[in-house]
Amino acid sequence: MSIKVTLLGTGTSQGVPLVACDCEVCLSGDPKDKRLRTSIMLEAGDKVFVIDSGPDFRQQMLREKVKQLDGVIFTHEHKDHIAGLDDVKAFNFILKKEIDVYASPNVLVALKREYHYIFNNSNYPGIPRINVKHIENKPFSASGVRFIPIEVMHYKLPVLGFRIGDFTYITDASHISEAEKAKIIGSKVLVLNALRKEKHISHFNLEEAITLIKELNPEKAYIVHISHQLGLHSEVSKLLPSNIELAYDGLKIFVA
């Protein structure tokens, strides 16, 4: 199955530039140093999915001129990954349908807290219309497309990555068990988080991400969930092995 992946955002929870920061990365004029919150759009055949709808979801949909949405799939419940869900109501109006939302039990608890008005059966005009699909660490089908969840640890919080065909997407991870790594082996393309060069309690740093990518051995890998502390895109890119690239917002990846 061939797929097209658009990196909607590649930044950490505060984005880049960081509010009120005067570091060289935040002041950079390079468009590749401007990072919205991490999210991807995946097109498989005639189906379109977004993995995570963060605070920049509306802006990302407008930038990419997205006209179709077959589902939103959540990795975990942190605000930088769920804060844009309200804006699916535009697709409700245009497409005249509910939007499927794929969520683990932990994510659903957070959605019901943050978006109580969606779940209180009020039928108030203009609220998002969603159809919740419960997922866990087992393969599932979304509109006929097979997703294989990969459970990673974000410090002590379980987070789901996903493998779709020969493409694997992992965000917000600091540890992956051997059993879960086995699900990634054989991927042609891997997207993986690396927050900064210094060690971090809940994210891989750059060295850890490079080491893991070498172990998993994809043909190509891209680094996401990047903070301003990692450094300038142009400078960090020079430090990477030939099959690893720093991702940037709007990058499109094609996986045969």
Image: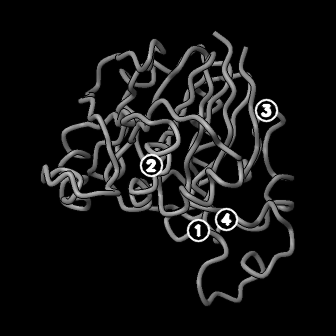
* Distance of label 2 from label 3 (alpha carbons): 35 Å
> Can you give x and y, in whole percent of width and height, for residue 251 in the image?
76, 44
Q: CA distance from mark 3 to mark 4?
A: 19 Å
Mark 1 vs 4: CB contact within 8 A: no
Residue at numbered disc 1: 15
Q: Is residue 240 above or below residue 141?
A: below
Amino acid at circle 4:
Leu
Task: Name the residue located 44 percent from the left edge and 46 percent from the top edge.
Answer: 173
Label at residue 230: 4
Residue beneath label 3, please?
243
Q: Observer-nearest residue: 65 or 40?
A: 65
Mark 4 / mark 2, whichever is N-terminal: 2
Please tell me which residue is depicted at 56% across the width and 22% down the height of the picture. 47
Mark 2 = which residue?
88
How packed mark 4 is, by other alpha carbons closer than 10 Å (few <14, some 14-19, many 20 or more), is some
Give the amino acid type for the residue marked by disc 1 in the picture: Gly
Kindly indicate the quadrant of the structure image that contains residue 125.
bottom left
Q: Amino acid at mark 2?
A: Val
Compare marks 1 and 3 and give the one earlier in the sequence: 1
In terms of secondary structure, where does tag 2 sit?
Answer: helix
Pick the quarter of the image with the N terminus. Answer: top right
The picture places residue 180, in percent across and down from the top left corner, at 39, 24
